[in-house]
Image: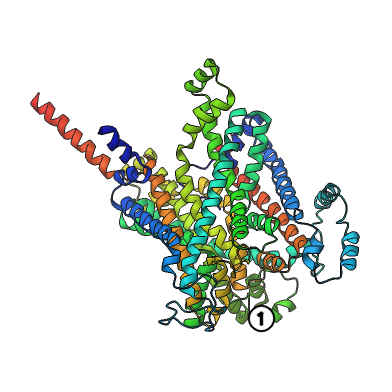
Amino acid sequence: METKKSLFSRLPIISQLKKSMGLQRGMLVAGIVLTVLFLLTAALAPLIAPYGATQRFDVAQGPPSSVHIWGTTAGGYDVFSRTIWGAQTAFLVIVVAVVLSIFLGVILGLLSGYIGGWLDRIMVVVADAIYAFPTLLLAMVMSIALSQGRSTVWSGILSAAISITVVFIPQYFRVIRAETIRLKAEPFVESALVVGASSVRIMARHIYKNATRTLPLIFTLNASEAILTLAGLGFLGFGIEPSTAAEWGYDLNHAQSDATAGIWWTGVFPGAAIVLTVLGLTLLGESMNDLNDPRLRGRKRSGKKIRKKNNTTQDEVVDA
Amino acid sequence: MTAMIDLPVDGPAEQAPKSKNKSGGSLGKYLAIRFVLIFPTIFILVTMVFFLMRLTGDPITAALGGRLPPEQLAERIHQAGYDRPIFIQYFEYLGQMATGNFGRTISDNMLISDLLATYGTATLELAINSLIVALLIGIPFGIIAAYKRDKWEDAVSRVLAISFYATPVFFAGLLLKLVFSVWLGWLPVAGRASIPTEIFMTQIEAPTGIYWLDALRSGNMDAYWDVVQHSILPAVTLGLLTAGIFLRLVRTNVIGTLGKDYVEAGRSRGVSEYRLLTRHAFKPALIPIITVMGLQIALLLGGAVLTETTFEWKGLGFQLAQYLTARDYVAVQGIVALLAVIVALTNFIVDVIAALIDPRVRY
C-alpha cells in the first residue's frame, strides 16, 4: 500500500504539483494545461481539422467566415486546419530532435566525463564553440547540408529535427559530463571498480542512472526551444514545404506581407499557436525546475511547518 | 539560445578557472589566455560550417544548376577550383581566412568583408537600439520583481518575461506592425528610412553608417525624426526578446544579493530602501548579469536575422536571408564565418569587462 502510494507521488509532474503552492502552483497548472492542449491537438488533428493541411480552396485571403472559421491564406489554404495540423508537425519534430539529442548528448557526456584527458578537453572546446554560436544559424547550415533547404514531409521533419539536434547536443553533453565527473569520485563507483566491473558497465549502470535525473527538466525547456528553432527555420523558408505539411513558421513568413495589407488572420492564428505552445512548455519546465531546487521553491509551506514545530516545541517546554 | 533555467552559469566560464589556476596571478596573463582561446572557437566553427556546406556538392551547381548548360557549369566549377579534392580546398580556405579574405559572393560578386562594412553597421545599430530597449525594461522590472518576491508584482514580471521569450520575433514584429503601422498608422511598416531620407543619407560626407548618428551630425532634423520613427518597431521587437532574459537574470541575482548580511547591516544603519536596492543589492549583482548578457550575443544575432527579415532592415541578417533564397552558399558560408568571429570576439570583450570589474574573476 505504502509503496504504491509513494510510487504515484514520485511520478515527475505529480510530485512537483504536491510540493507547489500559490503562484508557483498556478504557473505549473497553466503549463500542464497548455502542454496537454498542445499534445491533444497534435494527436487528434485529423479529427479536429475540417480540411487537410495541404487542401487548397478558390477563396484566397478570404476573411473568417462560417466555411473557413479563421479565413484562408493567399495560397488558398484554410488557416484553422493548417494551424491544427501544424501542432502535429511541431510535435513530431520536437520528439525526434529531443530524443536524438538526449541519446547522443548522454553518450558523449558519459564518455567525455568518465574517460577524461585529451578526449574530454577537445570535446569540451567543441561543445563550447557550438554552444556560443547562434542556434538558428547553425540549424540553418545543417538544414542546407541535409536537404538543400527544401524537402517532403518526412525528410523535412527529419532534417529540421537533426538540425535542431546538433544545436542541443552540447547542452545535454555539458550537464551529463559535469554530473559524471562528480559521480566518478563517489564511493559506489570506487566499490564497483574494486569488485572488477568494466568501464562500460560502470558507465551504463552506475553513473548513467544517477546522472540522468535532471534530464526531464532540460527536456521540457529544450522542447520549447525546438519549436522556436523550427519556426525560425520555417520563417526563413527552410524545412517543410507548404504543399507537403503545415508548419507555423512558414505560414508566418507568408503572413508578413498580408499584415502590411491589414490581413491579420493569416498570421495571428499560427503565431498564437507558437506562443501558447512555447509558453506551456516553458512554464512546465520552469516550475518543475524551481520546485526541484529548494532555494527557488516557494517558502510559505515550509515556513508554516517550522512555525508548527516551534509551537509544539514551545508546548513541550510549557508542559515540561 | 540559452535555456531559461535559473541554474548557476557554468560552461564557457567553467573552463576558465582551470586555465587561470595554472597561469597564476596577473590580469595580463589571464586576458592573454582568454584571447588565445578565441582561435579554437573560430577554427572549430569555420571548419564545421565549411564541411557541412560542401557536403551537398559545390556551391556553383547549387546557385546556378539548371540555369546554365552543363558544359558552362563544369567550366565555372573548374575555374573556381571546386573540382579539386575537398581537403586542398579546405586548407586554401583556411589560408584565405587567416588573411581576412572570406571569399566573394557568387550572385553579385561582392567581397564578403565588404558586406560587413556595408551592412554590418545596420545590424550594429539594430543591436544597440534593441539593447537599450531590453535594459530599460529588464533592469527596473527585474529589481522590482526581486524586491517584491512572490507578490503580484513578481508574478506579473515573471509571466511577462516568459511571454517575451515565448513569442518568436517575427510574430512580435507582425503584431506590432499590424497595430502601430496598419491600424493606428503611427509608425512606418518597414525599412531603415523613407526614400528621401535614404537619398539624403548617401550624400552625407564620411558617414558612420549608423543612420541616427549621421542624421544628427548633419543637423537635418527631419531626417533624424524619420530614422528614429523607422527604428522604433524593430528595436522593440528584438529588445523584447532579450528583455525577458535580462529581467529574469536581474531578478535571480538581486534576490541573491538581497539576502546578504551587508544589506541587512545597511538597513539597520538606516540606509533607505531605494539606495539599498540600487547600490547594495544591484551593483554586486551586475557581474553575473554582464557575463550572461555577453552570452546573449548569440541570441541577439539569431534574433537579428529574423527581425531584419521581418522589417526589411538591410543589415547582415537581411542579406543572409537574401543569399539563402538565391542559394548563394559561398556568401552564406562567408557571413556565418564572419559572425563566428564576431561572437568569439564579443565573448572575449565580455570576459575582459568582467575581469576589470571584479578582481575575483581573474584570481
Location of residue A76 with respect to B330 vertically, above or below:
below
Where is residue B88? Give x, y as percent: 86, 48
Q: Report the number of numbered marks.
A: 1
Q: Which residue is drawn at 67% across and 62% down?
A: A149
Q: Look at the image and tell me whether residue B359 can be seen.
A: no
Location of residue B154 with respect to A116 vertically, above or below:
below
Q: Identify the residue at the far left of this view.
A: A319
Instruction: Quadrant for the C terminus of chain B, please.
Output: top right
Where is residue B301? Give x, y as percent: 62, 59
Q: In this rendered view, identify the residue nearer to me: B99 or A113.
A: A113
Residue A103, quarter of picture = top right
Q: In this rendered view, identify the residue nearer to me: A96 or A280.
A: A96
Q: In this rendered view, identify the residue nearer to me: A285 or B278.
A: A285
Where is residue B77? Give x, y as percent: 87, 61
Q: Residue at x 56, y 35 (%)?
A: A177
Where is residue B133? Give x, y as percent: 51, 64
Residue A47, quarter of picture = bottom left
Going by the numbered disc 1, the residue's amino acid type is Thr
Q: Name the residue under label 1.
A: B197
Q: Identify the residue at the far top of this view.
A: A194
**Left of B308 or right of it: where is B258?**
left
Q: In this rendered view, identify the residue nearer to me: B275 or B287.
A: B287
Q: Look at the image and tell me whether residue A81 can be seen.
A: yes
* Label 1 SS: helix
Chain of the residue that carries numbered disc 1 in the rendered image:
B
